[in-house]
Structures are given as structure tokens and as C-alpha cells.
Image (cartoon, grey):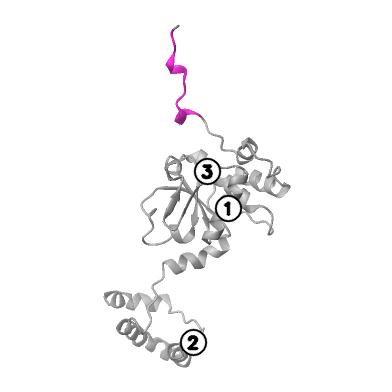
Amino acid sequence: MPIDFGRFKKREDSQRETHPIKIYDGLSRSGRLNDLWRGQYLALEEWEKVRKDNDLVVSLNTGGGKTVIGLIQGQALVNETGGRVFYLCGSIQLIKQTAEVASLMPLKVATYYNRQFENEVDFNKGEILCITTYQALFNGFSRFAKEEIAGLVFDDSHVASHIIRDHFSLHLDDANFPQTYSTLVNTIRGYYEATHSIQLFEQVVSQKLDPTVLFVPTFIWEDINKKLLKL
């Protein structure tokens, strides 16, 4: 009996579901998760309508099921792009909690923390999303720095800004970097004298336990940054 091998579809040729609600309904759930709550359903339905837009935010009350929403959105992006999609958390503990929620659905995911990768092959093949921390992705030595990223899901995005800013900030104190610190202080002192803010300036510089933060104006920094970078 002749066999037409052309009738067999390659795995990569098969169409993967991209609609978030259909993805959730298609999971062979173990019974530990119920159907989507109304808020989750409406959020995913609305997201599906505008998913081509950039920088989308899902806002629900605490306990509203945002983790499930984020995981389904992430998998929908994986299925759509076949690329690398990350679900970012603020801590390793949250990675573990999110991975546990995924296992209850059950939704296969990759995790990366403490330099340990779980399910890395499936992630690199564009089949599952990866749960990791903001710190792992947003730093100058990130192992993902040269990777092409297809999508990001920010869990508790309100904590992201200070984490990312901290990882791209240079901290110089007078004990460990005396020359650089002294140069910085003496270079910008004139600006605060001219603006009658020298008292506040001296307070911030001399009182080490003072929590006050003094921002250097951008136009001042533009004049001195090359000098400081040389140091």
C-alpha cells in the first residue's frame, strides 16, 4: 500500500492556538483550578482585542488572579511568535509561586534563577515561556543580553522601575572611590552655590546618614560626565 508522506504535517507547520481564553480552556486541568473568573475572562478578552499594541497593562484588585492572566498571555505570545517570551518576577520566591500556579493549570514553563535553568531546551525552541526575575534580565551581564526577545510579561510591574534603575546605576562612595567622589562633589558645588542651595548640598555631602536625595540637573551632568567617566 503506497503511503503519501506529504500528508504528514511537520510539527512546526501546525498552527498553534493564540487566543488566550481558548488556550486556557484547552489545558487538561487537574481539577485544582476552576474556570476563569469573570474578571480574568474579561481581561483576557479585552487583551486579545488590543494585543498588537505596545505596553499594555492589566489592573485587577489583589487576589483577582493576575498570575493566571499573565501566564496565559505569555503562552499566547509564545504560540504567536515562536520566540523567547519572559514572565518577570520581583524575587525568586515569586518565581517559585508562579511556577506552582502554572503546574496546577497545568502549563509547562521554564524557570531561570540562581544560574539554574529548568526546561531550557523547550524555551529555546519557542514552545514555552520562561519565568525569571527582573534582575536576571535587566543587568549588564545578563546571559540573555544577546538574545532576541519576542515578549515580556511584567508581574507586579510597579516594582520594576526601582529594580531596573538600581541595576543600571553606578554607586560611588567616598570610602571606596575617594578621588571620583571628591571630583564629583567639587565639580557640581558651584551650581548649588549659584542657586543658593549650598546649605542643602553641604548637608547631603557631609551627613552620611541623611536620607535626603539630591539630584544633579541633566544640563549640569552633560557638562561634567566626560570628566567623571575618565576617572
Q: Position of residue 196 (x, y in %)?
A: 46, 91
Q: Secondary structure at mark 2?
A: loop
Q: What's the residue type where badge 2 is placed?
A: Leu
Q: Is residue 209 in sight in this rendering? A: yes
Query: Could you tell me residue 113's position as x and y percent?
Result: 46, 56
* Residue interval drawn in magenta: 2-14
Q: Earlier in the sequence, mark 2 or mark 1?
A: 1
Tell us which disc is closer to us: 2 or 1.
1
**Picture disc at residue 77:** 3
Residue assigned mark 2: 209
**Amino acid type of the residue tagged 1 in the rendering:** Thr
Residue position for label 1: 98
Separation of residues labelled 3 and 2 (CA atoms)? 47 Å
Q: Secondary structure at mark 3?
A: helix
Chain-order first, disc 3 or disc 2: 3
**In this rendering, the label closer to the viewer, 3 or 2:** 2
Q: CA distance from mark 1 to mark 3?
A: 17 Å
